[in-house]
Amino acid sequence: QVQLVESGGGLVMAGGSLRLSCAASGRTFSGYVMGWFRQAPGKERDFVAAISWSDGRTRYVDSVKGRFTISRDNAQNTVLLQMNSLKPEDTAVYYCAASYLTLNWGTPKEYQYWGQGTQVTVSS
C-alpha cells in the first residue's frame, strides 16, 4: 500500500525558509511523477512543483520559480521541497502526491496517491 507522509511545515516570518519532506513507501516509484500542491482556505488545490522520479526533470508554477526547489533522494525514497523567501501568500496546506506516467504534471486529478498535508503559515 502506497503511503506518502509529509513533514516540515510550520510558522515562519516573511522572508524565511522551510523545507518540506515527503516520505514515500509501499512500492518503487520509477515512472512516477512526484508533485507538491497547496490549498489555502476557501481555494482550490493548486500545483506548486513536481519532479520525475526517474530522471529528475522538474516543473514549477511561475509564482515560486527562483524561490522553491524540488528534489528527490532515491535512496531514502524522499521528495523535498526547499522553500526560500517565503511570502504570506504561500500560506496553505501543502500536499505531496504521486502520479504514474502522467503528462499533465500540474493537474491534481492525475495523481493517484496523496499525503495528509502539512500546514505552512507565513506571517507578515
Image: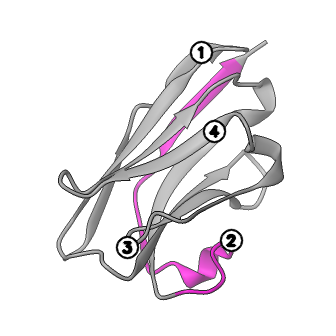
- Within 10 Å of the Cα at label 4, are there few (<14), some (14-19), or many (20+) other Cα atoms? many
Residue range of the region highlighted in magenta in the rendering = 102-122
Point out which mark residue 22 bears.
none
Residue where numbered disc 3 is placed: 54
Residue where numbered disc 2 is placed: 106
- When the figure is inspected, residue 124 is found, relative to residue 42, above or below; the finding is above
Q: Are marks 2 and 4 in contact (CB under 8 Å)?
A: no
Residue where numbered disc 4 is placed: 68
Observer-nearest residue: 99 or 92? 99
Residue where numbered disc 1 is placed: 12
In the rendering, at what x and y percent does residue 85 appear? 70, 22
C-alpha span from label 4 to label 3? 20 Å
Query: Which residue is depicted at the point 77% across and 25% down?
Result: 88
Q: Amino acid at mark 4?
A: Phe
C-alpha span from label 1 to label 3? 33 Å
Q: Amino acid at mark 2?
A: Gly
